[in-house]
Amino acid sequence: MPAYWRQGCWPWAIPGCTKNLKHTRHHWKRKWRRCRMTSIRLGGTIGIIGGGQLGKMLAQSALRMGYRVAILDPSEDAPARSTCHTFIHAAFSDFDALKQLCEQSDVVTYEFENIDAHILRTLVNDYHVPQGAETVLTLQNRDLEKTAIRNSGADVVPYEKLAGKAQLEQFIESHQLPVIVKTSTGGYDGKGQVLIETEAELDTLDIPFDEAEWVVEKYLQLEREVSLTVARSTSGQVVYFPLQENLHKDQILYRTIAPARVDYMEEAKTAVDKIMAAMHFVGVFTVECFIDQEGKLYVNEIAPRPHNSAHHTIESCSISQFDAHILAILDHPMPEVHQHQPAVMMNLLGDDLDRLEEKLFTEPDWRVHVYGKTGRKPARKMGHVTVLTDDLDTTLDQLEQKFIKGVEV
């Protein structure tokens, strides 16, 4: 018996669909698309919104498993273009192009989550997008995200939505300097953020409150930054990757150590479990956390897709985050995650690649990933290097000499 019949997807099983034949066909077609996920076979098509490095690595996992890949991206030379069967060159706001991607796909996922709310809700309504719309739309807005995390019961850094400078001054009076002001939407890798450490900086501050929404949060003195990557399937199976210890340089992730050198796995899992109970997640997502100097763990933000800090899993774990994501959205069983060996992952930014290009393949222990981006900019993520090691201290010393250049370990 076909999956769509078993699940009540015939026209006469849809309330209100017998009014006219055209209406019936439309509703049957929409519901059949959502139901057919249970019978996707090898050779079926996975559509990916976004063709950057994450889309490329997702596509590589899907191709290895025997699926076809269709990708939409606004960059004609997107890294993932070389790893797909169908490439749609269009903006993320191009509704017709997104519909075209969905029409050609059995299941749709994304590596780029800042999709227009109206468009995303329409796609979720009409096509099979297991991650849904509501969680990603919540996470697009820092105020909504932090409120949702707090409401789940997980700890967040003290914060407040800002309407103007007077409210900022009131927040500083209550929580003291330093504070960090962030745009509610659109910021990443340190963009749209202003750190205020002194009264003098506050006096000269010029934030365009009338041009965007902003939040302010207490800027913590950190002991460590960590992240936990998790995969959840459509039927609810959950697997956890090792807790990752992260170092940022100029607010961009520069290095990850896995497993983390601090024993906070249970605290992080507890926070993640609270968040999963309160919000809908399917596929891979990463919860980034702060540990302050008093040893308290706070949830900072959530990425509802594969994450830079878990790139090491390609070599270091029994399953990569990209494999886990494909299995999860297809609702295939996921194996328990085992880490073969501790790992250090270094981001290759544009200036790093300029310095190290001739040396990348002279180090036999370096697992090198270059994404294939054509525009090399100093702070742009161009690739990453993973090193597996049983001697973490020695490896970090060697990387400091050859790679890190100016970042404390």
Image: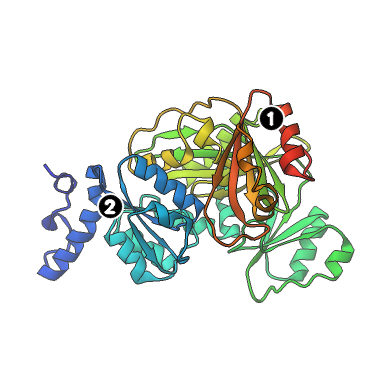
How packed mark 1 is, by other alpha carbons closer than 10 Å (few <14, some 14-19, many 20 or more), is: few
Q: Quadrant of residue 316?
A: top right
Q: Is residue 402 left or right of residue 183?
A: right
Neighbour tally class for label 2: few under 14, some 14-19, many 20 plus, Cα within 10 Å: many
Vertical relation: 303 (above or below) 101: above
Q: Amino acid at mark 1?
A: Val
Name the element at disc 1.
Answer: loop
Disc 2 designates what residue?
106
Q: Farthest top residue?
A: 390
Tell me the quarter of the picture where residue 194 sits: bottom right
- The residue sitting at 68% across, 29% down in the picture is 261
| Residue at 50% from the left image edge and 30% from the top image edge | 317
Name which residue type carries label 2: Asp
* Residue at numbered disc 1: 262
- Residues at marks 2 and 1, CA–CA distance in whole angstroms: 42 Å
Q: Position of residue 9 (x, y in %)?
A: 17, 52
